[in-house]
Image (cartoon, coloured by chain):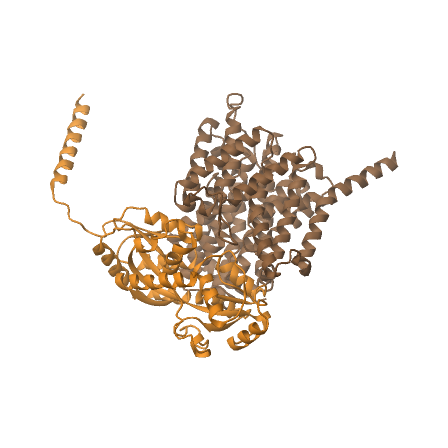
Chain colours: A orange, B brown
Amino acid sequence: MKKLLTVLLCLAMVFCMAACGSDEPEEVVYPDGTINVVVPFAAGGGQHVLATAISAAVDATMVVTNVTGGGGSTGAMEVLHSNPDGYTVLCSTLQNIAAGAYNGTYQEADAWEKFVPAATVAGDRMMMIASKASGFTSLEDIVEYSKANPGKLTVTGATANSYTQLVIEKFMADLGVEWEFVPFDGENACRNACMGGQVDLCIFGTAASSTAIDSGDCVGICMLSAERSSYYPEIPTVSEVLEGFDAYDFTIYRCYMLPPETDAAVADTLGGIIETAMSNADFVASCESMFLEVGFMDREKTTEVITNVYNECGEMYK
Amino acid sequence: MEGLASLGLGFSALFGEPLLLGLLVFGVFFGMVMGAIPGLTATLAVTIALPFTYIMSANQGLTVLVAIYVGGIAGGLVAAILLNIPGSPASLVTCFDGSPMARNGEASKALTLGVFSSLIGGTFSAVVLVVVAPKLAKISLMFGPWEYFALGIMGLCIIISIVGKGNMHKGLISAIVGMIIAFVGYDMVSAVPRLTFGRWELGSGIDTLAALMGLFAIVEVMQQVKTLHLKAKPMDPGKTRFWPKKEWVTGKDTIKTFSLGSLIGTFVGILPGIGSTTASMFAYNTCRSVSSTPEKYGTGFEDGIIASETANNAVCGGALIPMLTMGIPGDMVTAILMGGLIMNGLTPGPLLFTNEPEIVGIVFAAFLLANFVMYAMEMGLMKFFIRLLSIPMDKLFPAIMVMCILGTLTVHNRLFDSWMLVLVSVIGYFLVNNKFPLAPIVLGYILGPIIEKNFRTGVMLSRGSMFGFVESLIAMVILILAVVILFLPTITEKMQAKKLAKKA
């Protein structure tokens, strides 16, 4: 009986204390808990490694989870529908989100403008490589051959309907050539096909290209970005080789996006935390081993870039 | 021979740092426990461990990840043999003969043989990895769409030989059901959503773990629940031998099975995206085709276990080859391992061997040693594993179902996949109780997309020609092999019948 009484008394005290606690005004401290970072791509992949490197360097608790599927849309959709409290954040690419408005992978076409950007952390400059078996070493040769033999060369770079395919189609149109686009299941499979000589040309990021170039199975042809890669400074940009390509600047930006209606202050705080983390030496080393160009963009700048990419995609889809 | 030099470096590093050996033993144990529990897989084990490796040195991180990988694949056989429920999808084929053996009262023999086969397969692939890795790596590049298409067709032939004569139409229907399950989601070639019924969650399709565990674990549990009141006595395999008896493993056919299983496993491991379940299916079927007693397969035959377990463990070494030498992961686990390398600022690829021989050596040494640690531990802990699985069924089954649901939950970190597991198991339960075999569903599920995707890209690469495969030597050889494997049992049967007739 005595024991029961003690237990009851204790419980009563606990409740009282709990009640007292709730009377105090709530002060919003952010981040005050674990931030769940959703990476919509496979574990161990480039995006996952990047997110992990940031998580390890930030002055906050960040846990990375991989929510894969639907070409990056499954994870993005999950964040889109989650609580806008700043504790769930998407780590994807601006291009994946913007192109999703057109290619039907994102069930909501306006998802790209509903997200609240927190930061852009790094960019992967797009480039073209040719398989060694194809024998090409320069863009001029490829263009000359393609004009004489329309539809003869094959090109790959990503799954069907992706941003990369858009870029490839635009590149073909601007060059005035006709290649056969062959989709493969992800960057790895595309690269393997080009390394194995099954496909002649391949266009995607520097990170994916590096293995193919370093192994000697493929040759770097040109950068589709405005600047040369800091990792392959010998490969020229397309605008250096041909005229009329000055506007070409295709870089896949890795970004952090918050759910719709997240408070701008929360987004800026998170952006600030991430920016500080980016000076971490381990983070920089990780980016270097993935051939990424480190560069911070804040909420406003990221909004500007994703709007550009969105408009660009719209034009390419025409 | 740079591989051997690296191995030496790896061993000296491994033995020079006691912590590394400790991590190795822990990794094998952790992987084995995860592999032994139905629903939890090697992939999950490696994913769970990955964050912990961030605070470790590159050597430590890689050692523990490789050890988990080896333990995780080898752990699945215990439940497969004792419960007819694969501990992980890799051990699915082990059920075919393991479970009948256990029911025939030969559980301990089946367990010893299974673990021994794991050791042989793993060690064989480790040797291949060390000795010829750089040379073999290029094989994965020689396989384009037409070659994968041919492999898929060869796999389909397995369905026909697995279902046998009496049940052919139901077997084929099962295979088609498997393909339909696999077709859910965005198709890979034109990115059109199929069978998603307008739900975005289905865009990524029905996950492998949900499909395989639904079909094999949940359905089996539900089947056994029906007879739960009849046999309350848990299976007692008796004492297991540490080493198999000499006569168990020295038969002419058995040695052939060991070699074929190891070879096929290693080879399939090198090819990205095929996986250990398919490898053991291939090995099982090939060994049966060349066996002098093919009719014994599926009835509790030792060689069935050997084929399956050598192959699925050999996949590990095979999958490490293209990952280390070219940065091309052979399966999900090696993809995560590769992430572990990159996290440490190391780029896998041809330069890794020259720039970081010690890192390569650590992977070699850890992998080789992990196989032996796995053997000693799995045999030593067999009693513990058996006791784990001999908890009364009415408590074990709910636990297994919870584990399966937890396992699917971790795939995409959402509950949706667990619902898919339930849905698939309901379909599976319906099929099983109407005498439809389950194995063809798995083959249809795995091979359907491989064949479709590669056929379509192959046609694109051949500029619209449907017969582009005749230009590929490898594809033609595989297709011819497929035909041979398909008809060989019938031909040998006919010839033996003739011989018997002559004698009479």
Please give the name of the residue rendered at 57% of the width and 66% of the height, measured from the top-left corner.
A151
Q: Is residue A212 left or right of residue B503?
A: left
Q: Is residue A193 left or right of residue A81?
A: right
Task: Name the residue furthest front.
Answer: A318
Residue A311 visible to the viewer: yes
Residue B354 visible to the viewer: no
Q: Position of residue B482 (x, y in %)?
A: 69, 49
Q: Position of residue B163 (x, y in %)?
A: 65, 37
Location of the C terminus of chain A by quadrant is bottom left
Seen from the viewer's position, the closer of residues B151 and B43 is B151
Q: Position of residue B385 (x, y in %)?
A: 49, 37
Seen from the viewer's position, the closer of residues B1 and A221 is A221
Seen from the viewer's position, the closer of residues B359 and B458 is B458
Quick check: A205 above or below B261? below
Seen from the viewer's position, the closer of residues B82 and B347 is B347
Location of the N terminus of chain A by quadrant is top left
Q: Hey, which quadrant is residue A46 in on the image?
A: bottom left
Q: How many callouts does the rendering have?
A: 0
